[in-house]
Image (cartoon, helix red, strand yellow):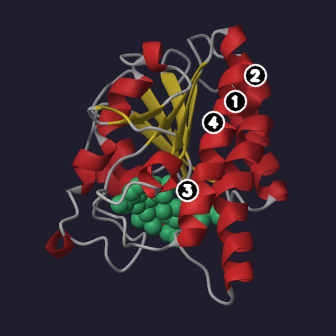
């Protein structure tokens, strides 16, 4: 079914920006989306919702919890058996906060937002190696993880704390740089991408009334990145209209 299509795995795509990205990619008949979801039920509902839209591309569910190595390895096995390769991987799954003390928050958010994407790429690398296209990795990051912006008092989010999230996205940016150095020489393209403040389930503030942009706008620029339009910006922290400083 997907042999001639570009196969893209998006983690955490049962809702929010990941779901929107899946929907936009499916507007192209040459795309096959592996909709990643840690919950089978939520993922199944998301796939059904996309299928009812009769979009030209094709979609299937891949259950993956990025904080669980067994789950990551099972997802790799499933994609290997069904498709034998992967063309693009979008590390979208993330959390903004966790219950408990700062120590617990930092550990849990770091596990999901940093260790998860690192391990997911490492596990899928052999299948990306078998891609028949230019393999692309997009790490969905945030300007909140930019050290340069954090130190800038004129930044709109200067008074917003969320240290566990900021620290995790700074860590993800380094994961991105390490992946760019590791896989770049093979011809792969690796990017950090900040969707900007967007409506989603990430936190209680991600709502239109607080100035968040539509989910479709947050996800939209990733379609161009995955189509190779920004390959010259390999390794960098991108936003819709340029780049953020590290
Ligand atoms: N929205 C913004 O303003 C904004 C700004 C900058 C960056 N971002 C980034 O954009 C990406 C998407 O976030 P979003 O705003 O769309 O938030 P969201 O609506 O909360 O979506 C996050 C997704 O990640 C999944 N997820 C969480 N932990 C997971 C795990 N361990 N394994 C697999 N999936 C997991 C969630 O699944 P469940 O449904 O099961 O919880 C959900 O599908 C994130 O990387 C976020 O940091 C968002």
- Which residue does the numbered mark 3 point to in the structure image? 93
Query: Under 8 Å from ligand 1: the CB of mark 2?
Result: no
Distance between the Cα atoms at labels 1 and 4? 5 Å
Q: Which mark is residue 182?
A: 2
> Looking at the picture, does residue 112 appear above or below residue 35?
below
Residue 176's label in the rendered image is: 4
Element at label 1: helix
| Badge 2 or badge 3: first in the primary sequence | 3
Q: Which callout, 3 or 1, points at the residue further toward the start of the chain?
A: 3
Q: How dense is the environment of label 2, judged by Cα within 10 Å: few (below 14), some, or many (20 and up)?
A: few
Give how far across and how far down residue 126 sits, in percent. Answer: 79, 25
Which of the two discs, 2 and 3, sits closer to the camera? 2
Q: Which residue corresponds to the image point at 69% horizontal and 72% vertical from the top-left? A: 106
Q: CA distance from mark 2 to mark 4?
A: 10 Å
| Distance Cα–Cα, label 3 vs label 4 | 15 Å
Residue designated by label 1: 179
Relative image position of residue 113 (x, y in whole percent): 63, 57
Residue drawn where x is 26% and y is 32% of the image: 241
Q: Earlier in the sequence, mark 3 or mark 4?
A: 3
Residue 143 showing in the rendered view: yes
Disc 2, disc 1: CB below 8 Å? yes
Quick one: SS at disc 4? helix
**Mark 4 and mark 2 in contact (Cβ < 8 Å)?**
no
Describe residue 184's horizontal placement relative to residue 61 as left or right.
right
Q: Is mark 3 within 8 Å of ligand 1?
A: yes
Q: Measuring 45% from the left and 19% from the top, which residue is drawn there?
A: 233
The mark nearer the N terminus, 2 or 4, is 4
**Mark 1 crowd level (few <14, some 14–19, many ≥20, 10 Å Cα):** many
Count residues near mark 4 (Cα–Cα under 10 Å), then give few for <14, some for 14-19, many for 20+: many
**Badge 3, how many Cα within 10 Å: few under 14, some, many 20+?**
many
């Amino acid at each position: 079914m997907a042999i001639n299509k570009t196969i893209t795995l998006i983690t955490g795509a049962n809702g929010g920006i990941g779901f929107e990205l899946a929907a936009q990619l499916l507007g192209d008949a040459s795309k096959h989306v592996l909709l990643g979801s840690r919950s089978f039920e939520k993922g199944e509902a998301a796939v059904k919702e996309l299928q009812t839209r009769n979009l030209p591309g094709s979609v299937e569910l891949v259950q993956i919890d990025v904080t669980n190595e067994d789950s990551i390895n099972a997802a790799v096995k499933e994609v290997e058996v069904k498709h034998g390769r992967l063309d693009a991987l979008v590390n979208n799954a993330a959390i903004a906060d966790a219950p408990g003390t700062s120590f617990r928050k930092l550990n849990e958010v770091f596990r999901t937002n940093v260790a998860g994407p690192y391990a997911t790429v490492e596990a899928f690398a052999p299948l990306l190696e078998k891609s028949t296209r230019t393999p692309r990795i997009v790490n969905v990051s945030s300007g909140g993880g930019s050290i340069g912006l954090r130190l800038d008092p004129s930044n709109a989010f200067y008074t917003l704390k969320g240290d566990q999230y900021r620290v995790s996205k700074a860590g993800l940016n380094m994961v991105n740089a390490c992946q760019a150095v590791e896989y770049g020489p093979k011809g792969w393209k690796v990017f950090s991408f900040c969707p900007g403040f967007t409506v989603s389930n990430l936190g209680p503030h991600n709502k239109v009334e607080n100035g968040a942009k539509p989910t479709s706008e947050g996800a939209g620029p990733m379609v161009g990145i995955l189509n190779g339009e920004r390959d010259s910006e390999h390794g960098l922290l991108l936003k819709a209209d340029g780049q953020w400083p590290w």
